Image (cartoon, rainbow, N blue to C red):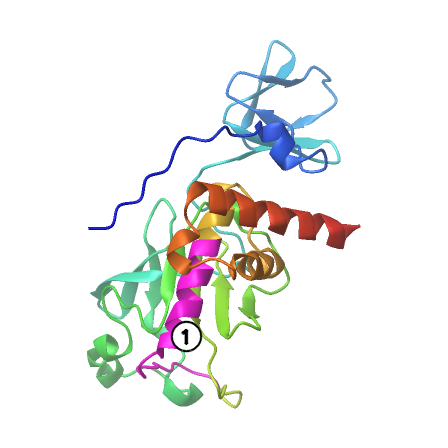
Amino acid sequence: MAMEMRLPAARKPLSERLGRDTKKHLVVPGDTITTDTGFMRGHGTYMGEEKLIASVAGSVERVNKLICVKALKTRYIGEVGDIVVGRITEVQQKRWKVETNSRLDSVLLLSSMNLPGGELRRRSAEDELAMRGFLQEGDLISGVLVQVSPSLVKRQKTHFHDLPCGASVILGNNGFIWIYPTPEHKEEEAGGFIANLEPVSLADREVISRLRNCVISLVTQRMMLYDTSILYCYEASLPHQIKDILKPEIMEEIVMETRQRLLEQEG
């Protein structure tokens, strides 16, 4: 039986790994954010003895005179326009219950779902009987679901990305990342629900697995997730085998290279 032994290695201080440009004002519950009474209290803060105090652990964000603390680890709180990736947990009457990494399960109504082929009509009893043919408990088709902290998903104009490596990712604002093979032919006519049950090739599975490990590496090092950071991390991981990416020393190496490329890109 092959056995791998690794000796402990000295870790660099966090400040050296992050660099000056990526430092944030981090606070823990009870820390004083400011004594200036001219600021307004936002989420994650409260007033005490004419001081603005943090009520959660996270990074301080300021918008004009409004100060709030964005928690480092929290359940997802939805906002209008968010892209959300979910997993079906239960099929009910005319609706599905969906796990979206929030405090409560979400609801997807049958009337809110696009029918196959984009057909526009009222939902009938036949559609209700066929609900399990559309979506059922635990459905995962041709892809991998990775769950991360919602605070690490960068908000962008689009959260659907076709990467040049041959796979696509959906970066859900709720912290669910969906990685799947890029379809060869995209339906752009009427839209609608389409279930792709074709087998996934070995090459596509390897690309998906490598992207999955890259996402976990970025999350472990507390880096923001968006298309460029994931692609740079993927390219930095190519000299290594997929199974080795999650080793601490290799993980730190590829994330450091990713961070350096991002800093060079920003100028």
Observer able to see residue 112 = no
Q: Residue furthest top?
A: 49
**Could you tell me which residue is drawn at 44 percent across and 68 percent down?**
207
Residue nearer the viewer, 125 or 180: 180
**Could you tell me which residue is drawn at 41 percent across and 48 percent down?**
246
Secondary structure type for disc 1 = helix
- The number of discs equals 1
Q: Which residue lies furthest to the right in this view?
A: 267
Residue nearer the viewer, 72 or 230: 230
Q: Which residue type does callout 1 highlight?
A: Asp
**Could you tell me which residue is drawn at 22 percent across and 85 percent down?**
126
Q: Does the magenta stretch include residue 113?
A: no
Task: Indicate the position of residue 111 as horizontal and vertical percent values.
Answer: 36, 74
Residue 99 found in image quarter: bottom left
Span highlighted in magenta in the image: 191-214
Residue nearer the viewer, 105 or 198: 198
**Could you tell me which residue is drawn at 56 percent across and 70 percent down?**
163
Residue nearer the viewer, 173 or 231: 231
For disc 1, the neighbor class at 10 Å (few under 14, some 14 to 19, many from 20) is some
The residue under label 1 is 204
Observer able to see residue 58 = yes
Above or below: residue 193 compared with residue 179: below
Residue 135 found in image quarter: bottom left
Task: Indicate the position of residue 252 as horizontal and vertical percent values.
Answer: 52, 43
Above or below: residue 49 compared with residue 66: above
Task: Indicate the position of residue 97 as horizontal and vertical percent values.
Answer: 28, 60
